[in-house]
Image: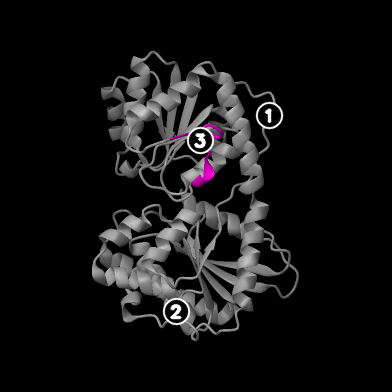
Amino acid sequence: MTMTALPAHPKTILMTGPSPDMVGGMGAVVAQMGQLDFGGRYRIEFLPNTFSTMAKESRWSRAARHIRQRRRLGAVIHRARPVIAHIHTCSGFSFHRSAWDLRVARRRRCRTVLHLHGARFDEYFATAGSFARRMVTSALSVADRIVVLSAGWRTKILEMAPSARIAIVENAVESPTMRDDRKPSATCRFLILARMDEWKGIDDLLEACVLLHRRGVGFELTMAGPPGTAGDAETIGRKISVRGLDECVRYVGAVQARAKTELLRHADVYVQPSRHEGMPISVLEAMACGLPVVGTRVGAMPEVIEDDVHGFLVQSCQPMALATAMGTLAFDIPRRVAMGKAARALAATRFGLNRFRDDLIALYDEILRDRRSPDTGQAKMSRAAVW
């Protein structure tokens, strides 16, 4: 990753997380942080811990990979002398691995940030065994700061670890240059950018499209993203055909960079029918491109989208409600144009990269003002937190 050149003697932040080349929200945030200009106060040194989804990787292969990661992390801390280790994580194995990274950093008296991205972290905690829950609570309690994406997630994390020190740092996106002469289409063009997972509401969206088609609504839907639990190209294609949607719905697979930008510029409305969420980067990107959003009342979505201002929010797992909201914007062109302008204005002010940089600087400054060492003034990390 190419980092911004900084003046002499900035403080080093060691960031670890997935490769920025990976498709997904966490990889996008990692890429953003690596490109921020901290004005000479801080510099980012990045250590990737994942280069692909590795869906078929065995448990033992994961364990071996993580052991190698721990050694690399210790070596980088010894060489670079970072003041803070900023660890990006989510649920499941990712959090177990991050608990180890947290322990390695603390043993070397490096302050720590756990940056939580998992849309289903609360579900993971609720369904985990007692050992795993103790590990989660212990890791959340000893980190110098837990970064969450919204006030709602702050409440959820405090229920898991009441002594956790939490900072809210909302996701951010770059505001693209948009053409002022962009014309809305009479045939409303909907777009979703997401992994094709069941919890992303893919099947709910297809059922909503069936309802729209039956009502005679003129629309197109482009579904873009890597294969997931809802299906791959063959499976998704079959789901589209079985529902009689071949003429109005297409799945184009994973997209990045220019291909993704072109889809956003071509669309009229963004759809996010998730059953769980954090604060989706794709939603913020759509808003920054001037698209109204039809989403669900999950995760941080209600804290981002004001209903009937930036788009519509409906209950999850409700294809009929989803179809009604989509149909409203398909028919009412002035309304969707007004909502798109409001969404773009919000993205530029509240979710810009300058705000993201300032929030991170404030976070790091606050941690370093704390005179306690990483091994004092905090609960000790229990043995349960190491795996």
At label 2, the amino acid type is Val
Q: In front of the other: label 3 or label 1?
A: 3
Lower position in the chain sequence, tag 3 or tag 2: 2
Residue 22 part of the magenta-drawn span: no
Mark nearest the camera among 3 and 2 is: 3
Residue beneath disc 2: 104
Q: Is residue 127 left or right of residue 151?
A: left
Q: Nearer the viewer, residue 214 or 227?
A: 214
Kindly indicate the quadrant of the structure image that contains residue 169: bottom right
Query: What is the distance, in whole Å, between disc 1 and disc 2 at their CAs?
Result: 49 Å
Q: Check if mark 1's residue and mark 2's residue have beta carbons within 8 Å.
A: no
C-alpha distance separating marks 3 and 1: 26 Å
Mark 1 is on which residue type?
A: Arg
Compared with 76, 348 (above or below) is above
- From which residue to which does the magenta span run? 303-313
Q: Which colour scheme is used?
A: one colour
Residue tagged 1: 179
Element class at badge 2: helix
Q: Where is residue 38 in the image (x, y as percent from the top left)?
A: 69, 63
x, y percentage for residue 88? Answer: 48, 63
CB atoms at circles 3 and 2 under 8 Å apart? no
In the rendered structure, are the residues bearing label 3 and label 1 in contact, judged by CB atoms less than 8 Å apart? no
Q: Which residue is depicted at the point 59% across and 59% down?
A: 33
- State whether residue 67 appears in this view: no
Point 26% across, 59% down: residue: 127
Q: How many numbered discs? A: 3
Instruction: Reply yes or no: does residue 308 show up in magenta.
Output: yes
How crowded pointer 3 is (Cα within 10 Å; few <14, some 14-19, many 20+) is rated as some
What label does residue 307 carry, if any?
A: 3
Whole-percent x and y of residue 5? 71, 63
Q: Is residue 263 above or below residue 68?
A: above
